[in-house]
Amino acid sequence: MTSPGELERSLRENLRGEVDFGAAARALVTMDASNYRRVPVGVARPRDAEDVAAALRICAEAGVPVVPRGGGTSIAGQATGIGVVLDLTRHMNALVSLDPAAKTAVVQPGLVLDRLREAARPYGLTFGPDPSTHSRCTLGGMIGNNACGAHSVAWGTTADNVAELAVTAYGGAAYRLGTGWAGAPAGLRELVSGNLAVLRTGMAGGFSRRISGYGGLDALLPERGVEVARAFCGSEGTLGVVTEAVVRLVEAPRAPALAVLGYADESAAADAAAGLLGFGPLTVEGMAADLVGSARGLPRGGGWLFVEMRDEGAARSLVRAADAVDSVVITDPAGQRALWRIREDAAGTATRMPDGSMAWPGWEDCAVPPARLGAYLREFRALLAEHGLRGTPYGHFGEGCVHVRIDFDLASGAGVARFRAFSSDLADLVVSHGGSLSGEHGDGQARAEFLPRMYGAEVIRLFGAYKDVWDPAGGMNPGMLVRPDRSDENLRFAVLPATPFAGEVARCVGVAKCRSTAAAGPQVMCPSYRVTGEERHSTRGRARLLHEMLAGEIVTDGWRSREVAEALDLCLACKGCRSDCPVGVDMASYKAEFLHRHWAGRIRPLAHYTLGGLPAWLRLIAALRLPPVVNAAARRFPVPGLTRERPLPPLAGEPFTRWWRRTGRHGAAPLSGALPPSPRASNAGGAGCARVTLWPDTFTEHLAPEVGRAAVAVLRDAGLTVSLPPKGVCCGLTYISTGRLDRARTVLRRTLDAVGDVRGSVTVLEPSCAAALRTDLPALLPDDPRAERLAAAVRTFAETLEECAPQWQPPRLDRPAVGQTHCHQHAVLGDAADRRLRERAGLGGELSGGCCGLAGNFGFEPGHEEVSEACAEEQLLPALRAAPPGAAILADGFSCRTQIAQLAGVPDGSRARHLAELLAEGL
């Protein structure tokens, strides 16, 4: 028998792509977006079809199974596997060609769907199937699962849009599949000829979403035209590996309109969906109030149908004919995108129950004929209640396909038993309505065990024979579809310890929004992945490594793990995942906890003591009146532990609080004294908010006191009395970001002691410090009620003005603004108040999304320079270069301003400014 080491050597010698049997590579692919986990022997990243053939030949000779993998967003376990995982996304991700006249494209399996759609858009074309993971799912994965998406009402499933497939089987034999028997494997024609009756009767009565099993096998019937490529779709990697595909494109509507129809409840919406199909909709999506909550823009109702039509006229005709409680027609593309985002994020948002507990896939996409959907949903809800379970159905109501995540307990024996009992009952319910156990995402391990209830023994036997024609050795993705593993085996939760941190790590369900390759726009996560393209630098990849670290099977050295440390090293702690991840994974917090434990009892990297202890160092330097000396020394000598590639920002000669003491009451005011409103202020503060506390964060205090001075001027002009907290307050940010959590707790307790009982608004100018006070403070000191009170009092500069001086009119600046919203503000604080304040001040334009890449200590640590600059080049720096003349450069974060000053070549007269500075200059 071939050992893993021998197999790895053989693959390395024969493949031009990478081969990695290391712990990190294996850990990254143990899971997909399902409840399952299987441990592979190794990972190969083939460069082309020849590499695929070589890998399949070598693995067959060694008797080692193979699993092809695309974006890893499968929700039934079929993208996990033992043996060798073929990662087809790294190299085999090209759009080979696009023929607008023929409306076809030739694609490689690792091509992300949105890349194909972007290439087709200039020709007025698109690829019809569009699952909600379109920004990261691959064409190969879509073919493997016969993916559908919202527009399948109009354009069908992936199988309906595939013309030809190049396939390599286990052992290395290559086939070219299309229509007709030419190119098909030996024995397939004879298998079909000998089973015509079974194909015609056992698979009769199908509907558009009958995806389960080898649901397209009846496409091989002579009266169906012997569509071999179509029959291959939906085989979930159990027959062979797609190395190239010819797909059909469709004409995209030029000005689609979205009709949103409100109904009394979910069942009423489901009952109405089938009746709308005669109007020729492009989509008929349904969801209920327990999914969308208080989302804006929806008409009255407790259940809604999102019906996209080709133009506004068709949408309004539909509304007139529909028996809806209320309705709205949206023609504005931005408004449509905002509502569709609710639907696209549902795979993640449905994972969170109203009480904050988690729900999981497993019975994610059953489908019934559309006319039966209302009745099915009523019985489905009753079945959930009978088993004491909760879930939030939504999905493709026009085709009877329902997505749902259910709050299964998959960690305890009793919970797993309930999961199995419910699965059995639900399979029977779906079959009783003439439905399909899978309507979109395939059966994988989650549902394949129950396929005999849907198809019967003869069809299941035929499925086995079909696989054996393609894969007689059984090496392709064993345990799926044919001779499947049980649905309650290989559950990913079983290996985790029962700890709060493990529960947080398990929160990542793998929908992989962090792997989006689209322009980031408002999304921040995950900046390092967007630079490197490596799974280990995605939020999901890091969560998977932490999962395996806790499991201890692959990553065996626990909190001392080198693999996890290396993956987290390029995490910028931007907190983008906290808001952008549909399930709220907070990798910045996970990184802090890991670093805390990883370095416990050991000497840390020097940067953890220099930048990690920045507040203490700067206070000491200021107290000794040494900023000029330190600035001169920093220009000549490197700082231990920091990169030599980046100059340190200079320290201010006069800290902000020293200026405060000197200025306030002609130098007689104590630090905690107050400055009254400006004599020229004509606006009284808001009720109960006339006095605000301005937080002297470390960056404002020692590095950018001009921001603090500007904020004081603006707040006083707005009619507010400004005070400062006592000396020594600190948000603990630098200690948190370097994982010195015990020190952070000490600092935060001292801060709470100094601040006392907080009253009124606490204005924090530095977004990262405001975010730390608002979220990290109560998380680190959960038993101290003062932490919650201080967190609740924190306001951004714009929020303070909006709440405490609502009648104040800012100066009109009337100029365009460019720059970037701080990552922590995007993720934790929100920027709605900032947008409104900029609009009132006449600062036009939009700030860029993404991440500046400096991220506090990150950009100053050795080895991070290239990634730091590449992050800035993704959105921020191009936006600055494209700025119109005279544009104001806005960046409220000190890191953002530093990155701009050091990388953008901005003249001194156009330096990046905090919003407070711009407003103060305009007074």
Image (spheres, rainbow, N blue to C red):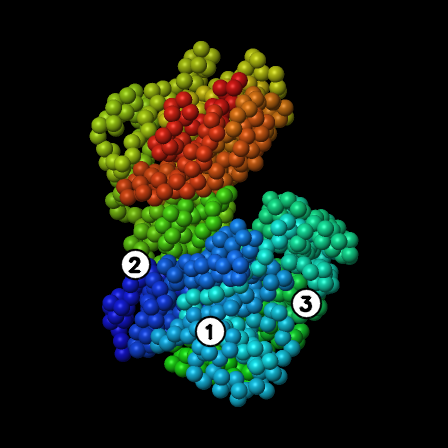
Q: Is residue 708 above or below residue 295?
A: above
Q: Residue at x 30, y 78 (%)?
A: 61
Cα–Cα span, label 3 and label 2:
52 Å
Graded by Cα atoms within 10 Å as few (under 14), some (14 to 19) or many (20 or more), the crowding at tag 1 reads: many
Where residue 911 sits: x, y (%)? 41, 26
Q: Residue at x 30, y 61 (%)?
A: 18
Cα–Cα span, label 1 and label 3:
32 Å
> In the rendering, which numbered label is found on residue 370?
3
Three-letter amino acid code at disc 2? Asp
Q: Is residue 675 above or below residue 476?
A: above
On screen, residue 732 versus residue 225, left or right, reads left
Graded by Cα atoms within 10 Å as few (under 14), some (14 to 19) or many (20 or more), the crowding at tag 3 reads: many
Q: Residue at x 43, y 63 (%)?
A: 109
Cα–Cα span, label 1 and label 2:
47 Å
Q: Nearer the viewer, mark 1 or mark 2?
A: 1
> In the rendering, which numbered label is found on residue 557?
2
Q: Nearer the viewer, mark 1 or mark 3?
A: 1
Three-letter amino acid code at disc 1? Leu
Which of the two discs, 1 and 2, labels the residue nearer the N terminus? 1
Which of the two discs, 1 and 3, labels the residue nearer the N terminus? 1
Image quarter for residue 128?
Answer: bottom right
Question: Would residue 550 be seen by someone viewing this image from the given angle?
Answer: no
Q: From this viewpoint, which residue is outermost toward the bottom?
A: 194
Three-letter amino acid code at disc 3? Pro
